[in-house]
Image (cartoon, helix red, strand yellow):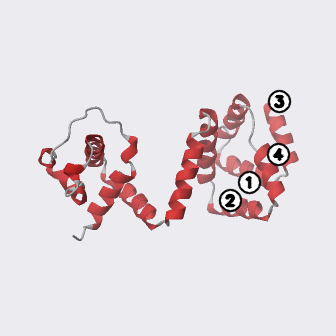
Amino acid sequence: MKLRPDVFIKTNFLLFFICSCPANAADKIPWEQLSGDQQEILEVLKESWDEMPPVRQQRLQKKAEDWQQLPPEERELMQKRMQHWQSLSPEQREDIRAHYKKFKDLPPDEQKELRERRHWFSNLSQEEKRQLRSRWESMTPDQRRAMAEKGGRLPPERRQKLRQYIDNLPPEERREFRRKMHEMTTEERQKLVREILGD
């Protein structure tokens, strides 16, 4: 049976997130009880539906409902993400799963810090990202380790104070500040942070 690309993507979306939704009841869901839209989304599972454990049926039904509620632009984004996921090798997928598990095992404050760093990086210009990558790639493993250990490991309240200082700068000054911070040595950067924080 040849699947339409949109049905394939929808189904993979559901399967990819199958473990994220808790199930409550233990009753099996007959295929006929699913709405027409849910049946279309879950079409590839029709033959094996009756053999599935009730918990899995309920999770899939919930994900099909969630899919129907997504605005078109979010569906498109999810389809692109699923296409990207499908294009990855099994090794790449396993690597992503391992990193995700490692992230989930971190304390909440460290998870928050990593999210903030990712957000900060995503807001850099392409040129700033290129420069940062180039600088990182030119470092020795010891330099990278030292940078990771020293860079940005401020206590949460001091990190918040520094973030507020940076956020209050006009956009052009903020970009210039970040550019200069990346060009500084670790010692220069630490000195500037101490000055900003009034140490």
Q: Secondary structure at mark 2?
A: helix
Q: To which residue does mark 2 refer?
A: 128
- Identify the image quadrant of residue 151: top right
Numbered circle sitting on residue 189: 4
Q: Name the kind of residue labelled 2 in the image.
A: Glu
Residue at 76% in and 48% down? 148
Q: Earlier in the sequence, mark 2 or mark 1?
A: 2
Could you tell me how far apart the alpha carbons at marks 4 and 1 are, in whole angstroms? 12 Å
User: How busy is the neighbourhood of tag 1: few (under 14 within 10 Å), some, or many (20 plus)?
Assistant: some
Q: Nearer the viewer, mark 3 or mark 4?
A: 4
Q: Name the kind of residue labelled 3 in the image.
A: Gly
Q: To which residue does mark 3 refer?
A: 198
Compared with 112, 85 (above or below) is below
**Residue 26: x, y in percent?**
25, 34
Numbered circle sitting on residue 59: none
Q: Nearer the viewer, mark 4 or mark 1?
A: 4
Q: Quick one: 21 or 128, which is closer to the camera? A: 21
Residue contact at pointers 2 and 1, CB within 8 angstroms:
yes
Residue at 56% in and 51% down? 98
**Residue 175: x, y in percent?**
68, 51
Q: To which residue does mark 1 refer?
A: 179
Q: Secondary structure at mark 3?
A: loop
User: How busy is the neighbourhood of tag 3: few (under 14 within 10 Å), some, or many (20 plus)?
Assistant: few
**Residue 184: x, y in percent?**
83, 52
Q: Residue furthest front?
A: 51
Could you tell me how far apart the alpha carbons at marks 2 and 1 are, in whole angstroms? 7 Å
Q: Earlier in the sequence, mark 4 or mark 2?
A: 2
Q: Earlier in the sequence, mark 3 or mark 4?
A: 4
